[in-house]
Image (cartoon, rainbow, N blue to C red):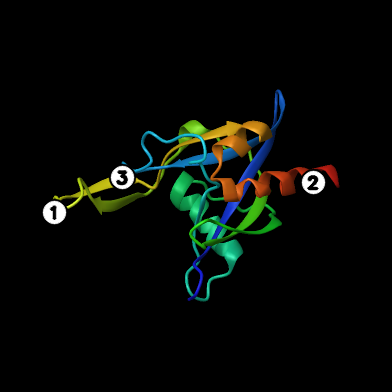
Amino acid sequence: MTSVTSAGILLYREGAEGLELLLVHPGGPFWRNRDLGAWSIPKGETAPGEATEATARRELREELGLAFDGPLSDLGEVRQRAGKIVRGFAGRSDFDAASLKSEPFEMEWPPRSGRLQAFPEVDRAAWFAPADARRKLIPAQAPFVDRLERLLAAG
């Protein structure tokens, strides 16, 4: 069995209270009432032959409406519960979360209704302190916060 690979970028900035991390909340009815353990870094599946860094940048455009061309630092990989491998990168940005422009996806909703409805890939984005980000993130992605903090501490 081949594992699905995704790539994404953990954006960070220096806020009034210190380090802040940008997370996104997935759109669609399944995630509507979920909060803790439901947020993610903006990420998506890598297309065949596509470099993971290119995937990560593409996903920022699709999920946030942000064309990010700044430098990236590699945060390594994590494996999510269902087996998906996520390659994380970090980049500095002052993205305005209120300017979120997420591309839509379609799914049958309600289930077995035969009706397709469109939902945004992400329904909101927000900046969080590292401790809050760890609680909000899908548990398997929390190591990206630790890795970023170590990277920034090392200069």
Q: Amino acid at mark 2?
A: Arg
Q: Position of residue 19 (x, y in %)?
A: 71, 33
When the figure is inspected, residue 43 is found, relative to residue 123, above or below; the finding is below
Of badges 1 and 3, the one in the foreground is 1
Classify residue 3 as left or right of residue 149.
Answer: left
**77 in relation to 70, above or below:** below
**Residue at left 51%, top 46%?**
66
Q: Which residue is mark 1?
A: 114
Q: Whole-percent x and y of residue 100?
A: 45, 38
Marks 2/1: CA distance?
49 Å
Mark 3: few/some/many CA within 10 Å (<14, 14-19, 20+): some
The residue type indicated by label 1 comes to Gly
54 displayed left or right of 144: left
| Residue type indicated by callout 3 | Phe
Contact check, label 2 and label 1, Cβ < 8 Å: no
Q: Measure the alpha-carbon separation of dots 1 and 3.
A: 16 Å
Which residue has dot 2 on it? 150
Which residue is at a point 34% across and 43% down the rendered structure image? 30
Q: Which label's residue is closer to the chain start, 3 or 2?
A: 3
Total count of labels: 3
Marker disc for residue 119: 3
Q: Which of the pair 109/92 is nearer the observer?
A: 109
Q: Residues within 10 Å of mark 1 (few under 14, many from 20)?
A: few
Q: Residue at x 67, y 48 (%)?
A: 143
Q: Earlier in the sequence, mark 1 or mark 3?
A: 1
The secondary element bearing badge 2 is classed as helix
The residue at the far front in this view is 81
Q: Residue at x 38, y 43 (%)?
A: 27
| Residue 145 x, y percent position in the rendering | 68, 44
Mark 3 to mark 2 CA distance (whole Å):
36 Å
